[in-house]
Image (spheres, grey):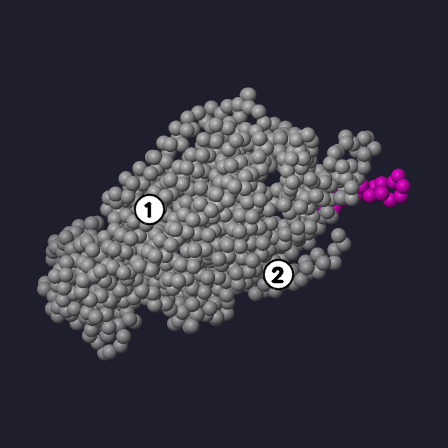
Amino acid sequence: MATRTITEGVTIARRRRLSETYIGEWIMTTDHKKIGVMYIVTAFFFFLVGGVDALLIRTQLAVPNGKVLTPEVYNQIFTMHAVTMIFLFIMPMLTGLGNYVVPLMIGARDMAFPRLNAFGYWIILFGGLFLTSSFLFGAAPNAGWFAYAPLTELSGPGTTSCGNAVMCTPGPNMDFWALGILMLGISSISASINFVVTILKLRAPGMSINRMPLFTWMTLITAFLLLFAIPSVTMASILILLDRHLGTHFYQAGFGGDPLLWQHLFWSFGHPEVYILILPAFGIISEVLPVFARKPIFGYTFIAWSGVAIGFLSFTVWAHHMFAVGLPLVAQAFFATSTTLIAIPTAVKIFNWVGTVYGGKLSFKAPMLFALGFIAMFLIGGLNGAALAIVPFDYQVTDTYFVVSHLHYVLFGGSVFGIFAGIFYWFPKITGKLLNERLGQVQFWLMLIGVNVTFFPMHIMGLLGMPRRIYTYPGNLGWNELNLIATIGAFTLGIAFLVFLWNFVITLRSGKEAGTDPWNAFTLEWDTESPPKPYNFLEVPTVRSRRPFYDKKNPETADWKSVTH
Amino acid sequence: MRMPLFRGMKRWGVLLPVLLLSSLLLAACGENSPSILNPAGPVALKESNLFWFILVVATIVFVVVEGLLLYSIVRFRERPNSTQPTQIHGNTTVEIIWTIVPSIFLFVVLVGTIYTMFGLTSFSSTGRPLQVRVVGHQWWWEFDYLNENFVTADEMHIPVGTRVEAQLQSNNVIHSFWVPELFGKTDVIPGHNNMSVFQADRIGEYRAQCTEFCGLQHAHMNFYVVVQSQDDYNAWVTSQQQAAASNPAGQAALAGRTLFVGSGGCQGCHGIVGVNLQDYHHLKGGSDASILVGPNLTHFGSRRQIAGGVLPWDPASCVVVTGSDGQPKIENPGSCGLYQWLKDPQAVKPGNDMNIRPLSDTEIAQLIAYLESLT
Amino acid sequence: MAEDQGQRKQPSKKQKASNEALDQFIKPKQSYWPFALAASLTITLAGVISHPIVLWVGVALVVVSLAGWGLERH
């Protein structure tokens, strides 16, 4: 009961303030751990929404001439599948994991700007609900997540309306899109500013940049990428809103504008964006592999600096999404070169992860399974991505299911596997309970099989001429069996996530107590209670190597005794 | 910790890639697919060869790296008697090697890529280049043969072994021009003059599809490239250049023509040279034919498909017979695509530009009889 | 600030009591302004799609939220 002290020894009961209620505690929180949990839960909710979108798509495409979805609905579903997964699942999920873990990893008590942190989360929730509410109005964004102009305009050339809905996309659908993007961009910028300042200024004494965990490194690089990439899409969105509502013609050829302006602006964001989606997952893997291989990460410096290289290079490759638009050959050659260059640091990372596993003492708990699955699947995505850099080949397969295969191998096989590695790894720290190991294994195998059954056939579908973003296809082109197989795979993945939900529910109810250090890990976040106290550390630790907690537990063989970094 | 599910991992590690690869090779055999691995022209051939090269390299890298990973998983798994592994932090020499070697290799591939890019449209041809203006509409393709002075839609005929220069135009949204068996795609962008240069070295019919999301019926915007011998092509050109016959044979066809030109009739959106067009580019009276929203129908009778490929067109399945009431009707409407289209174009291809008043079965049969005669 | 290797001794009973105080003391102060600003911003942008009135109400709320945030003692 809440009380108020009038004089010494005399208290009276009073109504609880908002901050003392359960709801109020969450609405008013500025604690990075609570905010992290909210990000993660919200992101997972949107993952399920995006997953339902995917299952609808695959159901429609399971057989030729499918009649499950009309083209109007299908175009909304495929657009929102991507928008939801990218902006409302992967980004907030990685931000949430980063929010929870990074301050603990660097020995800080909280993020540098706690209220800004909370703001970043609430915008995601409201922005996500705003964007998803468009379905209720039958006006969900329907011109692709990439929203190419002039399809997204509200009037055709020489007309003032969309006429027979033919020249453009009538209705508020793409307004929802542009405004949603603006909102989510604000959230990303807030979170990025917070991460940059926190990581650069609030590290524990002794933790030089060279000693901080790789997840922190990758989060820092991602934050910088966001700071430089979001303005591009913000500008692009504002310009399309102006075109749509205030009579400007930035993207309309008939009036002196240019549709390609949209593509350059969008992909200047869009390419760094894909690295934003994967780098934190790289960081998670770099934390999980060493712990479950019982040895340090192989090539810390190379992994860290590869991340930086990828960060810089990611701003030089954007037009590899535009090889077919008729750019001068010299320009295409430039982008082919930059895209080839960015493959190198990525390959280096993969080799270093394999080097971490090699020679270790491997324990195949769930986090490790997902981390190993990440390496295996991301490799495929990297290979078919490098194939796309071979421009004449790209001319054939761009805008086909070959690209759909690539992007899902890197985003699902990469980011999602990485995310689950992180979830299984840090769940015991966040909740004090261990997720069920057996169910985790089942989920892993369903995901591994599901990813390959769903997305491998798409390589072939692309080679056989199947374009992207079509709501149906005829039955005489040899695409039928492959599509059916992909649909079966998609439902397998759906089952995997039901298994996870079940795991989540039973663990919270009656899961095994985790203790403070269930994995015998190396980094500072494990040197706390599970869950950590609100103030994280009673005494801010001093750090003498890259594995401060390992050092504390093994003082005779501590890292700082054997290596100089 | 022993993991029962892990037994036989090594077997899977080999079996899986083999299965996946063989499925790839099997599927690539095409079975009627517009496969990029079934090249019928020099551009597609170069691009297809690149794919095979990529496949070999990617397979090798995959097997090596994945193999090393699987080997490590099996060899270094925790056993009851395993000791703590050496706490190795890295190896600078190894790092340098595995950075430099792939870089060199990638650089060589890059050089090959750029060389192929710049040489893609250098191939030997016979005769003079064919120049066609290709216009992407929502949602069908128009082909304007610039030097031969005619316009057609939904299929593009070219002579074998001849260089084709397609000028790509759109006055609406972005589309993409792609014939997988002949050449890689080029986008069709309003305000831009993109050109696609290609050639077909094998006679046949090659399916093509719009490959840039262009709105509601993007899925139904395909066309055929029909590659013919020089003689057959010349014959086709000659017939296309003719105006439509002034008086079609048969009562039904004549009635159909009346419907075409009647008030509220088809000529509001479609052009037929000799009927409402004085030539392929001008209406009778001189105004520009491009104000007509729908495809030119002058030689509709000899085409293979209708409405951007949403339905096939075959006169043999649209036989016009006389019904018991003395009026013409279609013998088997269920198997006649054109019947379904004329009956309710919005049901066949929702959102397309063709909004017509409901037609009776008699009127449809008459129109079909007329359209059939436009060979 | 010289520190040993971050060894944490088991807290004594007196220390346990002050841990409770620490719980209250060291965590960052709660605030409802981030929530308020986020909601206000959403209303503003929703106003772009719907009615201008919604837009201007949203703008007003944004201003109020920014002021509240800025003036809050933290």
**One can see residue A147 in this view:** yes
Q: Residues within 10 Å of mark 1 (few under 14, many from 20)?
A: few
Q: Of B255 and A213, which appears nearest the observer? A: A213
The C terminus of chain B - image quarter? bottom left
Looking at the image, residue C8 sits to the left or right of residue B122; the answer is: right
Q: Residue A7 in magenta?
A: yes
User: Foreground: B28 or A153?
Assistant: B28
> Which element carries disc 1, helix, strand or loop?
helix
Kindly indicate the quadrant of the structure image that contains residue B277.
bottom left
* Residue that mark 1 sits on: B53
| Secondary structure beneath label 2 | helix
Observer-nearest residue: B11 or C16? B11
Q: Chain of mark 1?
A: B
Percent coordinates x, y for residue B154 in the rendering: 24, 60
Q: Which residue is mark 2?
A: C58
For badge 2, the amino acid type reads Gly
Image mark 2: chain:
C
Residue B164 location, x and y as percent? 24, 63
Which dot, 1 or 2, sits closer to the camera? Answer: 1
Q: Give the answer, above or below, for where C69 lies relative to C30.
A: below
Residues drawn in magenta = A1-23
Q: Residues within 10 Å of mark 2 (few under 14, many from 20)?
A: many
Q: Can I make out residue A91 in this image?
A: no
Furthest-bottom residue in this view: B285
Rounded to the nearest angstrom, the CA distance separating label 1 from label 2 is 58 Å
